[in-house]
Every structure is written in structure tokens, then in C-alpha cells.
Amino acid sequence: MNDNITKNLPSSSSGALLFSNIRKHVDLNAHEAELVQGFFKTTYYPKKSVFLHQGNKCRKFYFVEQGSVRGFHTNLEGKESTIMFAVEDWWITDMGAFLNEQPANISMETLDDCLLFEIDSSTMQKMLEVVPKLEKYYRILFQRAYVREQQRALDAISSTLEKRYLGFLEKYPKIVKKVTQKQIASYLGVTPEFLSTVKNRMPS
Amino acid sequence: MNDNITKNLPSSSSGALLFSNIRKHVDLNAHEAELVQGFFKTTYYPKKSVFLHQGNKCRKFYFVEQGSVRGFHTNLEGKESTIMFAVEDWWITDMGAFLNEQPANISMETLDDCLLFEIDSSTMQKMLEVVPKLEKYYRILFQRAYVREQQRALDAISSTLEKRYLGFLEKYPKIVKKVTQKQIASYLGVTPEFLSTVKNRMPS
DNA sequence: CGTCTATTTGAATGTACTCAAAAGCGGTGG
DNA sequence: CCACCGCTTTTGAGTACATTCAAATAGACG
């Protein structure tokens, strides 16, 4: 459980994805990039590590530099629902819990060996004050995240399971390679048995 | 259908809610407030106006200064699904379509007589350049919207209809007063008949 | 008061679930 | 390299949930 390693970001080698991601949306000069780098910690987690436990305070916002991650909720009867995935170049956390420093509604586990960049809430606020142009970066990020979730709500209500499954395969090919059908089923809100029968019933 | 009135914001009277909303998150001096005001148009729509039609380009981001609004999707079989509501002091649009200037996936109708502040995509970009501190405002806005939608996804997957219905009543009391049960049912993703039977089956 | 729509109620149907068992697949140790 | 183990996936039978369709009741509005 504790074979992960936390250290400061090496100033030259790592962080490639994070910075290219930020630079897609805002210009960062060398000085600003250096500043930003100082706010993050990078941590290695081996495959199948649970690095956030439902019920614990969620203190960090994670950027996946390497690997892939699954976020899932466990209800009172012990049934797991997958709420979100993240692959390389994605951000992930229980944002509601992170914002209010409250107990997480979900757990997070690595699906692969992972390199995660982590920042906690107060550090992030400081970072946004020091490098205000990041406000734009995160504005765009959350705007898109909101769009994705809204689309998900629409699909869940108005589309068939078959279409939603095909949509998932198409939208998240990288994720598909990493996860089990059981996990996809729980993301779509059905049982693995039912997803299986629907798949076999599909034309193709 | 065309009895709505578009005009520039009167510089003193209106916009009270919009500006107090912005000022909850960022400081705006008088000059900035005036600038911002210039970017918005205010339009009056009587009750039951459809001011955005599914399939048409979605050009505007709306702030509800007065009244209330429903956004709904109509599928191929003609079945309506309510995707979102907005009451006074809320923003609303088909954000995916707005961002990419694409055909809307949803229609919007007023549930009340409404006063809406409207801004189009390119004007909004200009506004964000002229008053960059609004980036922070919208960052916070979308961050929260994302949290709400994520919670909705979690509830839809892992909670019972009864709990979701009670949660809706609790979270959105203002909306509850304005909408029919049929619309709440379609927001929760069930038929009005089934919501009715579940309600009667409830303890209380 | 009459009309239109929302809500309730009920019966019949279909969709998705649970439970159980078999088959497939990957990883581990001998 | 093979055999076994644990987990995922498939398949099927029975059940519960949610829908459709239809009809009765209740409310809202002109």
C-alpha cells in the first residue's frame, strides 16, 4: 500500500504532458512554467493502488501524466458504480469533495502503473493567484467537463443502452483498452450480465 | 412568436442579479461593470416562448434575470426529455452547441415571463479579453456546474427513484414550484405515470 | 361552464435485474 | 510449459421494475 514515491517534479524531464496540455489553451513563458511546476508534486502509484478512499477527505486534484485511473462509488449494499475514468493527459478528482474539502463520494484506483501530478486545494488557489492566466485554462477545462457530463445525462435519459455502449467505445477508445466490461457496464448504469446479452444481440 | 423585445441594458435599473452574482466571486469596479454591461443584450420573452429550437445553431449564453426556463431534448420517436432547468440568477444554454456554434441538441422554453441577458460566443470571448478577471468568475461557474452534473450522474446510476425525487425537491425548491410533475419525471428519466405511483408508495 | 392538460389508477407487456452455473482468460507457481 | 486458481464473461430461468396503453379524476385557464 505504501510503495508509492512522492517527490518534487524534476525540472527538465517530466511534466511534458501537463505543460503541453496547458499550452494548448494559454501561453506560458518559461518563468511561469517554472512557477507552475513548483506547485505540483508527482507521485508514482503501481497498478491497482487505491489512492483515494470514499469517505476520506479529498484533498487533491490529479493530472494523469502516465497510466489510467478509475473512480467509483460504493453504495450501502456494497454495489460499485463507476463514475469516471481518466487516461493520460486528463485531470481527475471528486471535484465536489475537493472544492469543499469534504469526504469523497468516490474511491479512485489505478488501472495501470501511474504517474500522477497532484495539487491540493489551497496550493491551487495560490497558483491561480500567482499565475492568473491559468484561470482561463481551468475555465476551459471545466467548461468542457461540464459539456461532457451534460451529454452523459442526455444520453442516459434519452438513448438506448446499445447506442450508449457504441458511443462509449467511440469516444473513449483509450479507456476501452484498459478496463473490463464489468466496469463499462457499471459506468453505463447496467449489470455486466445485461451488457453482455445486449452486445450479443447487436447487429454488427 | 415574435412578441419579444430586444434592447440594450438600461444602464442603471436592470442587471441587478447578474452583477451581484458576478461580485460574489470577483471584484468589479464601476468601470468594469459598465464595460460588462455593454456586452449583454436583454430580451423579454413571455411565458411558454421557445427561444431556442433543437436543430438550430445555438448562438447565445443566457442569464436568467427574471423568470424560469426549461431545456429539453426531443428524440426520434418524439419523446421529450428534460435536460436542465434554470431559475432567476442562473446561467443556461446548450453549452456544447454554444462552444462549437453547432446545432442545439435541446430546445429551451420559458416557464414564466422571462427577462434574459444574452451574449453570443464571439462577444463573450471579447468580453473575457477586455475584462480578464471574468475568467475566474466563469471558471468557478463551470466548476460548480460540472460538480452538479457529476452528482447527477452518480445519483442516476446508484440511487433509487424515490431518493432522487426527494433530492430534487430539496435541491431545487424554486424549480419545483414552477414545473409540472411530468417535467420532473422526464428530468429524472422516468414516465410521469411511474413517478406518480412511486410518490403514492412513499412513506411520509 | 367547458375544454385542455396533468395526474392518478390499473392491467398487460417488456425491459433489466438477480441468482446460478458454465465457459473463457490471464496470471502464478510448481 | 502446464495446471490450477480467481475473475470476467456468457447463458439461462425466474423475478422485479418500469413502461405502454387506456380510462377515470382532478386542476388550470379561458
Image (tube, coloured by chain):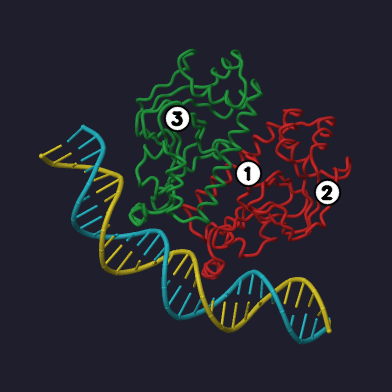
Chain colours: A red, B green, C yellow, D cyan
Q: Which of the chains bears the disc numbered 1?
A: A
What is the three-letter code of the residue carrying label 2?
A: Thr
Between circles 3 and 1, the one closer to the viewer is 1
Residue at image position (60%, 50%) is: A105
Which disc number belongs to residue B88?
3
Q: Is residue B164 above or below residue A36?
A: below
- Residue pointed to by mark 2: A6
Mark 3 and mark 1: span between their CA atoms? Answer: 28 Å
Q: Which of the chains bears the disc numbered 2?
A: A
What is the three-letter code of the residue carrying label 3?
A: Glu
Q: Are marks 3 and 1 in contact (CB under 8 Å)?
A: no
In the foreground, B52 or C16: C16
Provide residue A133's location: percent of width, then percent of height. 72, 29
In the foreground, B56 or B91: B91
Mark 1 and mark 2: span between their CA atoms? Answer: 23 Å
Dots 1 and 2 on the same chain:
yes
Q: Give SS at disc 3.
A: loop
> Which quadrant of the structure image shows residue A81?
bottom right
Few, some or many residues within 10 Å of mark 1 (<14, 14–19, 20+) = some
> Which quadrant of the structure image shows residue B144?
top right
Q: Give SS at disc 2.
A: strand
Which disc number belongs to residue A124?
none
Dots 3 and 1 on the same chain:
no
Q: Which of the chains bears the disc numbered 3?
A: B
Provide residue A50's location: percent of width, then percent of height. 71, 57
Which disc number belongs to residue A102?
1
Few, some or many residues within 10 Å of mark 3 (<14, 14–19, 20+) = some
Q: Give SS at disc 1.
A: loop
Q: Earlier in the sequence, mark 1 or mark 2?
A: 2
> Which quadrant of the structure image shows residue B202?
bottom left
In the foreground, B104 or D9: D9
Mark 3 and mark 2: span between their CA atoms? Answer: 46 Å
